[in-house]
Amino acid sequence: GGLRSSWLLNKWGERFMEKWDPRRMENTTRDVLSVAIMSEVLEGRGSPHGGVYLSLSHLPTNLIDDFGQWFRLVKPDWRYGGFRFGELVEEIKRGAAMEVVPACHFFMGGVRIDRDCQTTVPGLFAVGEVAGGCHGANRLSDVALTEVLVHGAIGGTAAGRFAKSRTRRPAEKRQAAELSAKLLQPLTRREGPSPFEVRKEIQRTAWEKAGVVRSGASLTQAAEAARELREQALPQLCCRSKDRVYNREWIEALQVENLLTVLELIAHSALARAESRGAHFRQDHPRMDDEGGLANAVVQQVDGRVSVHRSPVALCRCSPPPGRTA
C-alpha cells in the first residue's frame, strides 16, 4: 500500500522495476520487489548505504499530506510503529528520496506439523511463524495473524488433550546433568569468542550468502561458514560476565547454536531447490520448475548430518496454473 504511488530508483535515477514487471512496476508483489532491489544493490547500482532510492517527488505535496489522513497504518501526525516521521515527510515534500532495502519479515518455512499442529517429536506442538507448510512459496498480507488464531486454537486444544493423556515421568538425572553442564560452559571459560561477535558473523553470512538473492555458490559458502562456526567458535564461546541473572551475553551464547542450525537448514534446503519460486530466488536458476518444483523440501538430521528430501505438495482442491507461484 505504501509503495503504490512511489518510484524506485537506482543510483542512476532509473526506474529499474521496468525490467522486472513492466506492467505493474512498483505495484508488483513484494517478493519481486525484494529481488529487484537487492539485484540493483549487488550489481553496484544501489544507494550509498546499501539500498535503493524511493521517490515521491513526482507527486503534488498536498497529495502527500492527504496520504497521512487515509492510510490506516499511519496516524494523521505521521506517527507509525512508535516513530514520528513528520521531519522526513517534510524532506520528501522538498524533493528528497528515501533509501530503502528489504528486511527480514516472515519465515515461510518452519517445523513440519500435522493437522493437529503436532510435530514428529511426541508432545511438541508448533503454531504460527515457527510452523511450516502453511503458506507455500510466499505469504499473503495479513494471513499470518489468521494463522496464529486458527492454528493456535487447534494446537492448544491438541496439546491439552496430549497432556491429559500422559502421566508424569521424572526427568533423567544423567541427561539433566549433561544439559546443565553444557549450558554453564560459556560462564566457566576465561577466554574465547564473544557470543555477540559470533551472532554478528552468523547474521552477516545469512544476509550476504543466503539472503534475498542466492546462488548455488553463495549457499555452499553459507553452509561451509556455518559448519566452521559450529566446529570452531561454538565450543569456545565465552561470556565476559559470569552472572546467572539478567545476563544478556549468556542468553546470546545459548541462542547462537540455534541460529547456526537455522542457517544450515536454510542453506541446505535452498541448495536442494534448483529453481526460483516466490520468496526463494536463485540467480543461477531464475525460473520456476513446475514439473519438479511443486514439493516441499523437508530437512532432517540423520546420523548427525543434514539430510534433505522432497515431499509432494498435497493439492486437494485446485492446482496452480503453469508458471505461477504455488
Image (cartoon, rainbow, N blue to C red):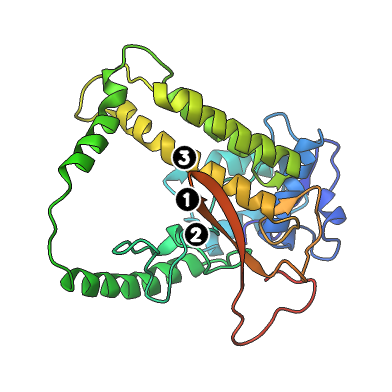
- Quote the CA–CA distance across marks 3 and 2: 32 Å
Few, some or many residues within 10 Å of mark 2 (<14, 14–19, 20+): few
State the image coordinates of residue 87 (x, y, percent, origin top left). 55, 38
Identify the residue under disc 2: 73
Q: Are marks 1 and 3 in contact (CB under 8 Å)?
A: no
Between circles 3 and 2, the one closer to the viewer is 3
Going from N to C along the chain, the mark reached first, 2 or 1, is 2
Residue 204 seen anywhere in this rendered image of the structure: no
The label shown at residue 259 is 3
Is 192 placed above or below 186 here? above
Q: Which amino acid, mark 2?
A: Leu
| Residue depicted at x 20% and y 68% | 163
Identify the residue under disc 1: 80
| Residue depicted at x 71% and y 61% | 277
Is 149 placed above or below 261 here? below
State the image coordinates of residue 161 (x, y, percent, origin top left). 22, 75
Residue 288 seen anywhere in this rendered image of the structure: yes
- Quote the CA–CA distance across marks 2 and 1: 7 Å
Q: What element carries label 3?
A: helix
The label shown at residue 282 is none
Q: Residue lying farthest front?
A: 303
